Image (tube, grey):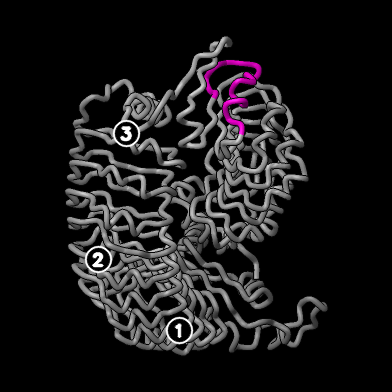
């Protein structure tokens, strides 16, 4: 008996040791996909796509074959076609031709796999709008993919592509194309036929030239050619009338491109071999806001830098500049000037360390002291010991009374500003608890108001009367709300509210459609309405860092105008910190992938 008992025990154990073949995709998941039209199989360690996935809309469900009854919500004959299939972060090496059995697919995500080729059957997915193929081992793009007329976005970064098919130009609906981090040495001329394209990323390839046909991309807003081997930029690119951002970092350029692109706001040409800035080149940059020239070999900055009247950020870090023209201080909107790593003479290192405002103030003083620059008296000392810089008022249209730790602004300043059409007021770093009443005297001309680092607890109704305002800086105050009447500020482009006491996104900001920059970092904001944000069609920068956001709505990913979204320092769990650290595009792409359809 003992032997029999022992034998039976051995048999039962051996039964447990027998490996059972478990279904890779549960029937419940497939059933849910049949209802929703979406199937997420990301990060499951798949080496191949299970056959039942391909046949999801072909085979009759098992329940129907068993002739069982269903509830109203379980009618198998009412299941929808699969429109979204997510297969990212697996171990797939190939995709079966059976992908053609899912003809309704609008989104196919295959990024972060081990695929070296794609089936020609992809060309039969005529409803496909988004194709994600990044982080694979693809050496070629099948010609058949170029027949997808509805394709709007294709991401191919981090592959092994050495060339692209000439038929690429047939993707007539394409708005986003990412070819970064490949091995491309040339581009097909048909690239210029992608006239709907808005974003094109060619960075981290081996390109030595760009085709003239790129000039036909008249709707392109962003072009990234960083980390290539470009020695010149074709002049024809000036025909790209919508181009706003151009990245040319880490190339072999010796001159600033001559690009009279009328919409170009941001130009990044750091880490090249540029030795001088020609006045002609600068004159083309009529609406430039950000100019990055760091890590070049520039020796002098021309006095005519004042041509860049719209410049807000100028990065000259790590060049060979020895002298800085005082005229740079006359740039009316310049907020950031970076000069570290230059052999500057006559400017002390500790002055540079104090930041842009102090440096520009020093340079303005240099102009004031030069009789060839300014005639007559430029400053006067008043009984109140307030220093009125008449030159700033008359020439720069700037009324400045900052870092005085004062509770009010002396009348003498407003007297000096009478009839001078002052456009900028800087009363920062004082102890003001309200807006000076006499500020209303500048009602017709004031466009830039800086009342940061004060003690404002509420927003005065007077602010709503300044209809010419384009920029407001209220950072480091004690504000908790904004007035609804601010919706009348129809020219307002940027508002800075960092370090205040806002517990929710100010409702009135949703109504100011002209806004392109909203900075709300370091408050207590706990929610944001993405549907109302979408109506801010010009919004490109949104800072919500260090707030109390517990949830980031996926619809925020549909705010297509956003170029900079800061979310770090909030207590939300998704998106994960690793995704947030990858930058705005990665966050928006993640959020879009979470939107239920």
Q: CA distance from mark 3 to mark 1?
A: 50 Å
Query: Which mark, by number, is residue 119?
Result: none
Residue hosting label 1: 172
* 127 over 292 or under it: above or below: below
Residue hosting label 3: 326
Instruction: Check whether the beta carbons of the residues at disc 3 and disc 2 lie within 8 A of each other.
Output: no
Look at discs 2 and 1 and give the one toward the viewer: 2
Look at discs 3 and 2 and give the one toward the viewer: 3
Closer to the chain start, of discs 3 and 1, is 1
Instruction: Check whether the beta carbons of the residues at disc 2 and disc 1 lie within 8 A of each other.
Output: no
Magenta residue check for 322: no
Visible residue check, residue 267: yes
Q: CA distance from mark 2 to mark 1?
A: 25 Å
Magenta-colored span:
401-418
The main secondary structure of the magenta stretch is loop
Q: Is residue 403 left or right of residue 508?
A: left
Q: Is residue 16 left or right of residue 323?
A: right
For image coordinates 57% across by 15% down, the residue present is 405
Task: Locate residue 127: give its quadrant.
Answer: bottom right
| Helix, strand or loop status at disc 3 | helix
Residue 527 x/y as whole percent = 69, 46
Residue 321 x/y as whole percent = 20, 37
| Helix, strand or loop status at disc 2 | loop
């Amino acid at each position: 008996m003992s032997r029999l008992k022992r034998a039976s025990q051995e048999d039962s154990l051996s039964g447990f040791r027998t490996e059972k073949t478990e279904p890779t995709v549960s029937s419940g998941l497939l059933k849910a996909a049949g209802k929703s039209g979406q199937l997420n199989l990301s990060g499951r360690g798949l080496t191949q796509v299970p056959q039942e996935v391909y046949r999801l809309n072909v085979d009759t469900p098992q329940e129907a074959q068993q002739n069982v009854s269903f509830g109203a919500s379980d009618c198998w004959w009412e299941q929808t076609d699969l429109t979204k299939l997510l297969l990212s972060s697996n171990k797939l090496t190939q995709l079966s031709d059976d992908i053609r059995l899912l003809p309704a697919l609008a989104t196919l995500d295959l990024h972060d796999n081990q695929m070296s080729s794609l089936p020609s059957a992809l060309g039969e997915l005529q409803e496909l709008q988004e194709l994600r193929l990044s982080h694979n081992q693809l050496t070629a793009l099948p010609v058949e993919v170029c027949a997808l007329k509805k394709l709007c976005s294709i991401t191919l970064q981090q592959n092994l592509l050495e060339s692209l098919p000439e038929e690429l130009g047939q993707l007539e609906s394409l708005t986003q194309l990412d070819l970064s981090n490949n091995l491309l040495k040339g581009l097909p001329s048909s690239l210029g036929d992608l006239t709907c394209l808005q974003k094109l990323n060619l960075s981290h390839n081996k390109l030595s030239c760009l085709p003239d046909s790129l000039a036909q991309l008249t709707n392109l807003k962003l072009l990234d050619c960083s980390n290539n081997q470009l020695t010149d930029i074709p002049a024809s690119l000036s025909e790209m009338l919508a181009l706003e951002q151009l990245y040319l970092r880490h190339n072999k350029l010796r001159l600033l491109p001559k690009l009279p692109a009328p919409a170009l706001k941001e130009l990044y040409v750091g880490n090249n071999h540029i030795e001088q800035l020609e006045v002609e080149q600068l004159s083309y940059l009529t609406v430039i806001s950000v100019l990055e020239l760091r890590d070049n070999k520039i020796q002098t900055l021309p006095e005519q830098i004042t041509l860049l009247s719209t410049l807000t950020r100028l990065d000259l870090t790590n060049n060979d500049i020895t002298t800085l023209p005082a005229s740079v201080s006359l740039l009316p909107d310049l907020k950031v000037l970076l000069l570290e790593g230059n052999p500057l003479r006559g400017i002390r290192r500790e002055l540079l360390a104090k930041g842009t405002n102090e440096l520009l103030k020093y340079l303005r003083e240099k102009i004031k002291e030069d009789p060839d620059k300014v005639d007559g008296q430029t400053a006067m000392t008043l009984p109140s010991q307030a220093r009125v810089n008449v030159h700033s008022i008359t020439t720069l249209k700037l009324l400045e009374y900052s870092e005085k730790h004062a509770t009010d602004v002396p009348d003498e300043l407003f007297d000096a500003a009478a009839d001078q059409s002052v456009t900028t007021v800087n009363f920062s770093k004082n102890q003001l608890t309200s807006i000076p009443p006499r500020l209303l005297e500048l009602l017709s001309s004031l466009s830039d108001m800086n009342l940061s680092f004060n003690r404002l607890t509420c927003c005065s109704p007077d602010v709503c009367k300044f209809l010419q305002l384009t920029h407001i800086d209220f950072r480091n105050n004690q504000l908790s709300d904004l007035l609804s009447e601010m919706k009348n500020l129809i020219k307002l482009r940027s508002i800075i509210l960092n370090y205040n006491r806002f517990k929710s996104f100010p409702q009135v900001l949703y109504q100011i459609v002209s806004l392109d920059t909203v900075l709300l970092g370091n408050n207590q904001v706990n929610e944001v309405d993405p549907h109302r944000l979408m109506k801010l069609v010009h919004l490109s920068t949104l800072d919500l860092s260090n707030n109390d956001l517990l949830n980031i709505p996926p619809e925020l990913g549909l705010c297509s105008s956003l170029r900079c979204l800061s979310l770090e320092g909030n207590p939300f769990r998704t998106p994960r910190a690793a995704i947030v650290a990858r930058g705005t595009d990665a966050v928006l792409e993640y959020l879009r992938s979470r939107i239920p359809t």
